[in-house]
Image: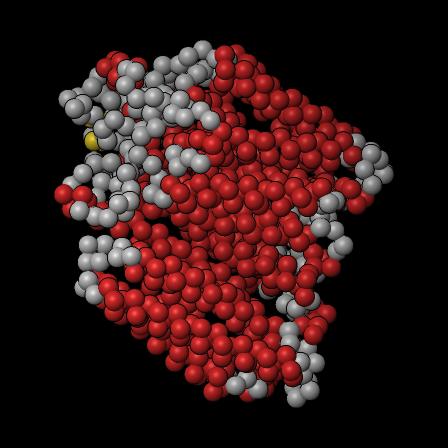
Amino acid sequence: MRLSEDDSHALAGAPAAPTYLEDGTTVMSWLNTRDHKRVGVMFLVSVILFFFLGGLFALLIRFKLLQPGPFFLDALGYNRMFTLHGVVMIFLFLIPSIPSAFGNFVLPLMLGARDVAFPRLNLFSYYLYLAGAVLAILAMIQGGADTGWTFYTPYSSTTATQVLPVLLGVFILGFSSILTGLNFIVTVHTLRAPGLSWMRLPLFVWGIYGTSIIQVLATPVIGITVLIVAVERVGGFGLFDPARGGDPVLFQHMFWFYSHPAVYIMVLPGMGVISETVAAFSRKNPFGYKAIAMSSLGIAFVGFFTWGHHMFVAGQSTFNAGAFGILSMFVGVFTAIKVFNWVGTMYRGAISFKTPFAYICGFLYFIVFGGMTGVALATTSLDIHWHDTYFVVAHFHFIMVGASVMAFLAALHYWFPKMFGRMYPEGWGLVAASLIILGFNATFIPQFLLGNFGMPRRYYQYPEHFQALNVASTAGATLLGFGFLIILIYMTIALRYGQRSEANPWGSKGFEWLTASPPPTHNFDEIPTITQMPHDYRTHEPPGVIRVA
Amino acid sequence: MSPEAASLPEGILAHHFASLERQNEAMRLGMWLFLATEILLFAGLFTGYSVYRFEFPLAFAECSRHLSLTAGTVNTIVLITSSFTVALSIHFARTDQRRAAVVCLALTILLALGFLGIKAIEYTAHFREHALPGKYYAFEEVKIPGAAMFYTLYFMMTGLHGLHVVAGMSVLTWLLWRTNQGRYSSRYYTGLELGGLYWHLVDLVWIFLYPLLYLI
């Protein structure tokens, strides 16, 4: 039988199956779960925790930079702080954030599947993540590392700080990331509901699929690279040590072979979130569905051939630099395709300006600004001026914080009722969103200016005439911090006291809304048969048919 | 549940798969992806090898001549034979010849042990000659720059491969136990097949290491 929207709500309200939250409430029932939704929630809580830890480190760095001379932190403490900020934010927050938390929760729902292909492996991936995090924390307690998150040799193989546990932590976290990616690829290939062909896949699934390919194919390379550095530290094998005939630039090649595609691990899922939410909040079919889907794969592919742009001043040949520069600009082309299509989706849609939509607007602005400065940086002649200055710092924060974190927040607000069956306070949501977007600009626009004036990144001291801009940046960072704190507070309250939401409070036509909110443990009483494209707002029928026995 | 699934031993078909066929497909795809990650893990070391071989061609050739060609060749034959026996064990499981499958798996594990034994003899010789990586290098017979780098790569590549041999042996031992219990038969043998795939990869990596290290 074909269900109207009202019927599906009635069905969702039926007390037949307990929700995944009610199905076992002991701690062990969570720690030992095979349910992709619970694994997703555990990832969500963990990454938010580490986001605030990494944010705290960032604030401490900004606080020191209020003064040009020694102040608050000593030089070594400062170096440790920016290393911890980078390691925590990249490996413990950004990389697992959207794929492991929201991907785990909604991807099987979007596919009409009862779980991911390998549920036990999924839980194992979470425990690997915890193990890697524990190692990283252990290193912090012992004093932390001072190499920067990039671990450049030969400094990283000789410094006296605790680099080894951090390297091992990164290795284990990489394993976790590979297993999640592998699981998602197999899930998309083998567990799609009847009628769900590849060209009907939700755009979030396309984003996660592209991400997973990068996770599976690039992460092993950082694995072996950090292992070599670890062996180098312990045994003095000399593979990257110029004193023993080794080549430190080889380390940079191998490191960036992973770490540049890793940027797309951080941003592609975010693009997927925006593709979903922009259609849902404009109540309009995604404009250029195929172009958005294929450009995700395009970014995943070309992302593997751009790593050399981190090494324009590391003694690379002119030809290599030019080739890497041009290849890097292709990422800009694919991103621009997406941006045009997102704006095209909004055009003449029935926009409801809810909190997720505020983040969509923030995302669009940040990705265009960050992307354009990226294209500028890919130009070798300009990069020589900007290399290793605050200009680069501001550029990648525009992408990683500006774009990825905006998408993370859009996802958090959009899927909060799906995950917990409650609503967040809309008014506070918009206040926090405005504060964050304002604070973000105030933090990083001064850094673009500082970089252009020639202030190098990671320096402990700076000339006095840079102080005004540094103070402005710190003030912005404080504002940003307050914004995130407000979200943490109202989300924690909403978890318990938020207004109960309907099964589909947004009237979204995404496939994940075909089931109840929060969903029962087995997701669907009967697997739906998909009859439409995702987010098809031209009809009033739900996108799938559920046969009720 | 289909009648086909009902006749399977307990716990083979997971609840979220509609059919065994689909589950087998998922498991195979997962394994192939995992093998791809393994290849990329080794790729880092192969990249290092190519860079330094171009930088120090003479030292690499000279050091290679000091490895035992006999040990390397015998080990290659041992591993290829073990790949054959593991393939046979899958064949026997698939045709419901449980005893033969168990014997072939046992043979595979023995051959793997043999491989590690020969490797250990080679390692002992290197330690005696101080043909060691990086700062420990004190080999009297080759004193040109880059020799230490050859041994760094030699030990890291064969060491990582050796770890994979050990991991493969553990997997095969577990599979031997499960095969002996009668879990793998003509109805279901995917688990055994995946173990075999992994073992072939371990073999394949060695097939690249052998010419690169022993036959320059």
- Viewer-nearest residue: B83 or A423: B83
Where residue A394 sits, quadrant-wise, is top right
In percent of width and height, residue A356 lies at 46, 22
Q: Is residue A309 visible?
A: no
In percent of width and height, residue A25 lies at 44, 24
Is A348 left or right of A89, judged from the image as shown? left
Q: Is residue A467 above or below residue A497?
A: below
Is A157 left or right of A403, judged from the image as shown? right
- Viewer-nearest residue: A542 or A375: A542
In percent of width and height, residue B52 lies at 59, 73
Q: Is residue A38 visible?
A: yes
Q: Is residue A64 above or below residue B55?
A: above
Total count of labels: 0
Say which quadrant the N terminus of chain B sits in. top left
Identify which residue is drawn at 43% across, 21% down.
A420
In percent of width and height, residue B31 lies at 36, 55
Identify which residue is drawn at 14% across, 43% down.
B3
User: How is the protein colored in the picture?
Assistant: secondary structure
Q: Is residue A19 above or below residue B188?
A: above
Identify which residue is drawn at 42% across, 12% down.
A500
Identify which residue is drawn at 42% across, 35% down.
A33
- Viewer-nearest residue: A513 or A38: A38
